[in-house]
Image (cartoon, helix red, strand yellow):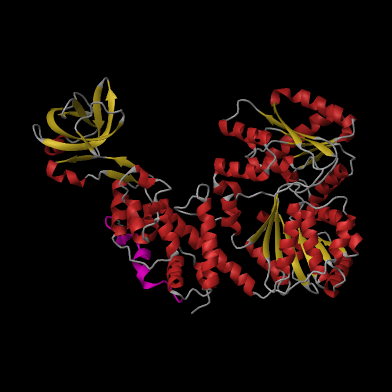
């Protein structure tokens, strides 16, 4: 696989090789992310204009684009500067005007000689009950009228490009299309009725009707599938490469696990049992595990992770659990401790705070194997942190952690298994796009004893009532979070908003009752504010969104979110999940500022209707689109030109199973279909995947 196959060279040449594209236009095309003919081929028209000929504009639903044959009548030159030039024309039934601004009379007289017949095509609108066609798109003599496409594709444009220019360049790029061998499974292609790749590109650029522009049109579906397939092949190759890194089979004796299960006050849910089984079986394989544990807020991921860590310890190795922040690391530590004590396992924590002799002692114990399970923050990545035998790395809150860091952590052990936990339910299509290289375990049941949370919408005008309710609840010994609005401009504005609210609540509820946490605080101060809330010394915690991930205070049963309409759905769902962890019935108050936008209202209503994180995620995806949902910048989500993740999730799932099957049958892609798939990877610029294929 030394370099790009020759058959693709023309598609990767400069844009200047295309008709009508000079250096200046080529530069303009960059605004569309088009740098070579290949990019233009994958920039499909987004709509089309029907230019079928009609006998008359009479009876048409105006304004709309019409194509008619006319006899040219009189020319009406403007009586003064700034007025348009008009030409009267007559079709089979009625008279209307062609209108031109800043026009050159001599040119118009040549184009439209009085008494002659022409075919004109353009947008017709009614003006003072006279039909007008300002600046027709086409004016042609009858013998050249075939040049007008019956259905004209409309391309996306950027400053400096015209429809005609893009269409001409695209037509020229289509002339370069090679015949490529088929990479799609023949049975699948015939079942779906998809055209060949070349035919699909041609049809997509020359649609004959609006139906052929639809996402569901066979040519479009096929091209979307090609993109998804190339992406899933890349992920499948990455997965195969990770698995090639021979793992160490960690065989569980079940002894430590049963000790912990005995100490539990309840039975694990069916979903937890299933996930524990999947992970235990996976760890017993001599291949490296690379698994995503997906579960909604409060679905009990920590117990599953602990069971996995115990498998590593039972097999004579060590486990590490990573958290994105110090607070969360300490919380994991506190949550795991009673269980590890029941099992007689040594648990320790390592964060950036450990210094000097204490840190040295921990590192020594870790290297000697005296620490069985380590909980930590990014500090675990430092080079002097050495394990005796690291078997499993558990990473919390995936999206704060890139793929590169997953790899780095895995490299600490000879072949450590990897379990990534996320509390953000991700719709299937996105999890396939983002984590297609991983196997997925899903926790889709709530553990017993979780009380439903009452969610209510309150307008900001009723702030005083809310504070009054809060006063009563505090008197009854309850605790509350008060989340301040998200101000886009800057963190310092967020901070001011939080500080103002903090002062007002203290004045209303009492000095020592209210605590404050925001992003600008030094970590130690943040930790101590959190600690006094956890301990119950402060009853109300005012904060910006720093509390959204993971903090667990069972006694907190009220969540007030100010200006809730300014938050995203997933974020609101995460915040709400901070309450409802104890025995009390919990409440979440979504305070909004009227009037609300349509989408703001929709978001808050979805939250009021359901607590199911997966349903909320699907709705969120439908409302916001894929890039927004995870923040395209850091999501590692591929940018597809044709495929639409929201609407084509079934196609994505198909591509994943197809890619995995192809590699299972032909790991080095040497068969005929395998060779074709290599060409697909080059065509889709999946250079990473190409490097992963063993050369040969």
Q: Position of residue 459 (x, y in %)?
A: 69, 25
> What are the residue bounds of the magenta stretch?
1-20
Q: Residue at x 39, y 56 (%)?
A: 194
Q: Position of residue 502 (x, y in %)?
A: 79, 34
Q: Is residue 57 magenta?
A: no
Does residue 675 appear to the left or right of 20 in the view shown? Answer: right
Query: What is the tally of numbered marks visible in this picture?
Result: 0
Q: Is residue 2 magenta?
A: yes
Considering every residue shown, the one lying at the far left of the view is: 115
Does 458 sit above or below residue 302?
above
Q: Residue at x 57, y 46 (%)?
A: 628
Q: Residue at x 70, y 68 (%)?
A: 410
Q: Position of residue 503 (x, y in %)?
A: 80, 32
Q: Is residue 47 visible?
A: no
Q: Position of residue 165 (x, y in %)?
A: 29, 50
Does 565 sit above or below residue 595?
below
Considering every residue shown, the one lying at the far bottom of the view is: 696
Q: Choose between 130 and 257: the one closer to the eye.
A: 257
Q: Residue at x 78, y 49 (%)?
A: 522
Q: Is residue 402 visible?
A: yes
Q: Choose between 3 and 383: the one closer to the eye.
A: 3
Does 415 sit above or below residue 278?
below
């Amino acid at each position: 696989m030394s370099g790009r196959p020759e058959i693709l060279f023309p598609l990767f040449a400069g844009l200047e090789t295309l008709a009508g594209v000079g250096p200046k236009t080529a530069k303009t095309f960059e605004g569309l992310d088009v740098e070579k003919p290949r990019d233009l081929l994958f920039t499909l028209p987004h709509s089309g204009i029907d230019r079928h000929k009609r006998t008359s504009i009479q009876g048409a639903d105006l304004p709309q684009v019409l194509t008619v044959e006319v006899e040219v009548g009189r020319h009406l030159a403007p009586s003064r500067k700034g007025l348009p030039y008009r030409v009267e024309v007559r079709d089979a039934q009625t008279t209307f005007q062609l209108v031109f601004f800043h026009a050159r009379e001599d040119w118009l007289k040549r184009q439209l000689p009085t008494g002659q017949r022409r075919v004109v095509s353009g947008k017709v609108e009614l003006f003072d009950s006279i039909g007008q066609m300002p600046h027709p798109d086409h004016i042609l003599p009858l013998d050249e009228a075939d040049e007008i496409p019956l259905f004209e594709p409309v391309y996306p444009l950027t400053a400096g490009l015209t429809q005609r220019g893009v269409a001409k360049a695209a037509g020229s790029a289509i002339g370069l299309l090679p015949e490529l061998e088929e990479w799609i499974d023949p049975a699948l292609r015939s079942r779906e009725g998809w055209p060949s790749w070349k035919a699909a590109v041609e049809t997509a650029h020359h649609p004959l009707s609006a139906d052929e522009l639809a996402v569901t049109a066979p040519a479009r579906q096929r091209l979307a599938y090609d993109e998804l397939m190339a992406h899933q092949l890349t992920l499948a190759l990455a997965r195969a490469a990770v698995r090639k890194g021979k793992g160490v089979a960690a065989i569980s004796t079940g002894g430590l696990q049963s000790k912990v299960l005995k100490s539990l006050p309840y039975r694990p849910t069916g979903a937890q049992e299933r996930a524990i089984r999947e992970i235990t079986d996976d760890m017993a394989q001599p291949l490296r595990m690379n698994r995503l544990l997906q579960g909604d807020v409060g679905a009990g991921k920590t117990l599953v992770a602990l069971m996995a860590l115990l498998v590593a310890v039972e097999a004579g190795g060590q486990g590490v659990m990573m958290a994105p922040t110090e607070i969360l690391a300490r919380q994991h530590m506190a949550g795991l401790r009673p269980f590890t004590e029941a099992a007689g396992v040594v648990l320790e924590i390592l964060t950036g705070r450990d210094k000097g002799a204490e840190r040295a002692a921990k590192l020594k114990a870790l290297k000697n194997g005296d620490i069985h399970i380590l909980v930590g923050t990014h500090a675990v990545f430092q080079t002097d942190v050495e394990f005796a035998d690291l078997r499993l790395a558990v990473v919390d809150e995936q999206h704060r952690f890139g793929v590169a860091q997953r790899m780095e952590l895995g490299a600490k052990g000879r072949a450590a298994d990897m379990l990534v936990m996320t509390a953000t339910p991700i719709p299937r299509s996105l999890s396939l796009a983002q984590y297609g290289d991983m196997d997925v375990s899903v926790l889709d049941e709530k553990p017993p004893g979780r009380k439903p949370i009452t969610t209510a919408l309150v307008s900001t005008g009723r702030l005083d009532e809310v504070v009054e309710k809060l006063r009563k609840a505090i008197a009854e010994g309850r605790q509350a979070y008060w989340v301040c609005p998200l101000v886009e401009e800057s963190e310092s504005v967020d901070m001011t908003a939080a500080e103002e609210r903090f002062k007002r609540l203290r004045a209303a509820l009492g000095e020592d009752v209210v605590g404050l946490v925001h992003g600008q605080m030094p970590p130690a101060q943040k930790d101590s504010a959190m600690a006094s809330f956890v301990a119950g010394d402060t009853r109300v915690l005012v904060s910006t969104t720093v509390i959204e991930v993971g903090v667990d205070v069972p006694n907190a049963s009220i969540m007030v979110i100010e200006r809730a309409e300014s938050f995203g759905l997933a974020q609101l769902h995460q915040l709400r999940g901070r309450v409802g962890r104890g025995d009390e019935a919990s409440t979440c108050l979504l305070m909004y500022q009227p009037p609300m936008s349509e989408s703001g209202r929709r978001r808050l209503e979805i939250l009021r209707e359901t607590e199911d994180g997966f349903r909320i995620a699907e709705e969120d995806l439908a409302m916001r689109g894929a890039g927004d949902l995870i923040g395209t910048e850091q999501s590692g989500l591929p940018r597809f030109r044709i495929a639409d993740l929201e609407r084509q999730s079934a196609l994505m799932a198909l591509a994943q199973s197809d890619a995995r099957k192809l590699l299972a049958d032909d790991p080095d892609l040497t068969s005929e279909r395998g060779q074709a798939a290599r060409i697909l990877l080059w065509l889709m610029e999946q250079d990473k995947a190409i490097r992963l294929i063993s050369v040969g």
